[in-house]
């Protein structure tokens, strides 16, 4: 169970975080943006203490890493720096607003603990008399491995809610929460028109504003949501068709596969989601330096969907890459979007173009998502992370420690791997490496590791996701 914490404990926990040093200012600004998104997601879930933690960590990161960054005074960063400063001011007032609730919960918890201890001392030793009041609990803590059914229900409930017009849903999304989410999007606001901002929650997935008409296409292989989906004739019809799942259990709407009755202990009975209970997934794994990693839920069907989309490139011996985007629900990350950015590729490389990067982050900010890593194909190579891949991955992992790199090597065995850089030594070694060659050597070994369970990644059958293809030149 997750116990309430005092503001002092939260601040101490927030400060105890090893931020990567010497990263490019752009990466630092994106990292800061992710912290604001996480705070907003925690607040939406009613988890005020983790919301406070990320607001504090964001402010702390700004003062220690952004305002003192060697490039912070450069003219080209002036607008972004001004917005970052505004974000920190907003943090401080938001933290003041959250403080009374956090303190009240903490005080109630302390009182309950004292009452319980007083009753215990009155009882004879060894007494197991029932009726001892337990301290109040904040949330039901779940394990990613045992509670996949709840994970699926939580994700689908939240993703469904986001597709609804927020004007009809004031009970769920109160003004304060909206305010902080707007704050999270503000860093890139000048790139969006006021029209696109006001309608982004309703229709941005289908009418992406930053992509000139005739280029972007969105497929939604997930379960249809009739109320918010525009008529089919409004959807762009070019681009690759939604890929067909190759196996019955990869179906986008199928329930999670039933566990085999003959293997292992009986699974816990399926639980239904309570509308009043708060849920929290416990950390799924730890980095090599002991930092907890939250669970990253990955739709089981995503890989098949991606390799199908990449098939024509793969046949032509060209790599394809996609960006894994997701959201934080109940202290776990759920991949909800696979974005295929504009890119250039060879048989051994695949890189997002500068335009592709701008569009990607516009899309991510518009949709209130976070980048949680990337996926790419190795058309002829085996399944591993090349030196260049490690450098790409480290950027995502700085922005979000749970970010992963998925490699699909369709012609090899194993045909896929889900990796993260070790920390230490991988993350720091790559951040400190300034070589650029495709397969340049690194002195250290053990630079990356498997991330799939028992790592922090859990595949989740039936988890809805959208494929958003922003490539100019679709093969
Ligand atoms: Zn690669
Ligand atoms: Zn290197």
Image (cartoon, rainbow, N blue to C red):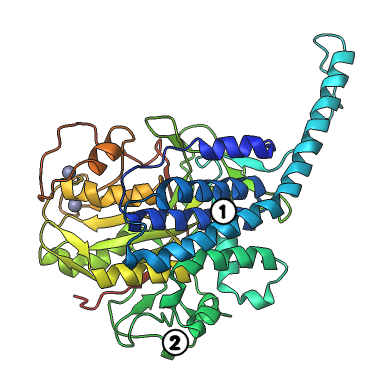
The residue indicated by pointer 1 is 39
Mark 1 CB near ligand 2 (8 Å cut): no
In the displayed orientation, state which residue is furthest to the bottom: 233
Residue at position x 44%, y 45% from top? 64
Left or right: where 107 falls relative to 83: right
Position of 194 with respect to 76 (left or right) is right
Q: Is residue 247 visible in the rendered structure shown here?
A: no
Q: Secondary structure at mark 2?
A: helix
Give the residue pinned by disc 2: 232
Instruction: Establish if 175 lies above or below 213.
Output: above
State the SS at label 1: helix
Whether disc 2's CB lies below 8 Å from ligand 1 is answered no
Estimate how packed mark 1 is, as few (under 14), some (14 to 19) or many (20 or more) residues with alpha carbons within 10 Å. Answer: many
Q: Identify the residue at horizontal 53%, vertical 54% (top origin).
A: 38
Please tell me which residue is depicted at 34% across the width and 55% down the height of the picture: 25
Query: In front: 2, or 315?
Result: 2
Looking at this view, is 6 or 141 the one in front?
6
Q: Residue 171: horizontal and vertical position, in percent?
A: 73, 68
Q: Looking at the picture, how far across and down is residue 30, in whole percent?
A: 40, 58
- Chain-order first, disc 2 or disc 1: 1
Is residue 271 or residue 403 the one in the foreground?
A: 403
Question: Is residue 234 rendered to the left or right of residue 340?
Answer: right
Give how far across and how far down residue 432 sits, in percent.
Answer: 23, 40
Residue 159 lies in quadrant: bottom right
Q: Quadrant of residue 441?
A: top left
| Residue 399 or residue 339, whichever sits in front | 399
């Amino acid at each position: 169970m997750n116990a309430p914490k005092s503001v002092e404990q939260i601040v101490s926990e927030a400060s105890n975080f090893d931020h990567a040093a010497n990263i490019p200012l752009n990466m630092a600004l994106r990292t800061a943006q992710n912290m604001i998104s996480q705070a907003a997601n925690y607040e939406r879930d009613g988890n005020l203490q983790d919301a406070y933690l990320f607001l504090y960590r964001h402010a702390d990161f700004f003062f220690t890493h952004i305002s003192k960054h060697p490039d912070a005074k450069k003219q080209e960063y002036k607008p972004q720096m001004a917005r970052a400063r505004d974000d920190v001011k907003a943090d401080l007032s938001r933290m003041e607003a959250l403080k009374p609730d956090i303190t009240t919960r903490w005080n109630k918890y302390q009182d309950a603990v004292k009452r319980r201890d007083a009753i215990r001392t009155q009882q004879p030793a060894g007494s197991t008399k029932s009726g001892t009041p337990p301290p109040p609990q904040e949330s039901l803590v779940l394990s990613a491995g045992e509670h996949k059914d709840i994970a699926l229900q939580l994700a689908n409930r939240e993703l469904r809610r986001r597709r609804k017009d927020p004007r009809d849903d004031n009970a769920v999304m109160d003004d304060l929460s909206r305010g902080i989410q707007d704050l999270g999007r503000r860093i890139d606001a000048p790139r969006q028109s006021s029209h696109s901002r006001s309608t982004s929650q309703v229709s941005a997935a289908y009418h992406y504003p930053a992509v000139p008409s005739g280029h972007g296409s969105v497929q939604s292989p997930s379960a249809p949501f009739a109320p918010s989906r525009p008529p089919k004739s409004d959807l762009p019809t070019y681009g690759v068709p939604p890929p067909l799942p190759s196996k019955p259990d990869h179906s986008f709407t199928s329930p999670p596969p039933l566990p085999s009755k003959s293997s292992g202990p009986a699974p816990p009975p399926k639980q239904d989601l309570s509308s009043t209970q708060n849920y929290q997934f416990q950390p799924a794994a730890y980095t090599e330096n002991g930092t907890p990693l939250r669970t990253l839920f990955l739709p089981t069907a995503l890989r098949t969907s991606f390799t199908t989309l990449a098939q024509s490139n793969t046949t032509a011996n060209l790599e394809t890459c996609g960006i894994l985007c997701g959201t934080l629900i109940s202290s776990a990350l759920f991949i909800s979007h696979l974005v295929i950015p504009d890119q250039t590729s060879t048989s051994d490389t695949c890189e997002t173009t500068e335009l592709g990067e701008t569009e990607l982050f516009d899309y991510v900010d518009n949709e209130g998502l976070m980048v949680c890593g990337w996926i790419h194909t190795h058309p002829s190579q085996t399944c591993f992370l090349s030196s260049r891949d490690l450098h790409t991955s480290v950027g995502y992992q700085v922005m979000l420690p749970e970010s992963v790199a998925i490699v699909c090597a369709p012609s090899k065995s194993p045909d896929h791997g889900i990796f993260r850089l070790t920390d230490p030594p991988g993350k720091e070694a790559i951040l400190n490496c300034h070589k650029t060659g495709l397969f340049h050597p690194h002195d250290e070994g053990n630079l990356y590791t498997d991330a799939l369970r028992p790592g922090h990644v859990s595949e989740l059958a039936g988890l809805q996701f959208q494929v958003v293809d922003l490539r100019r030149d679709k093969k």
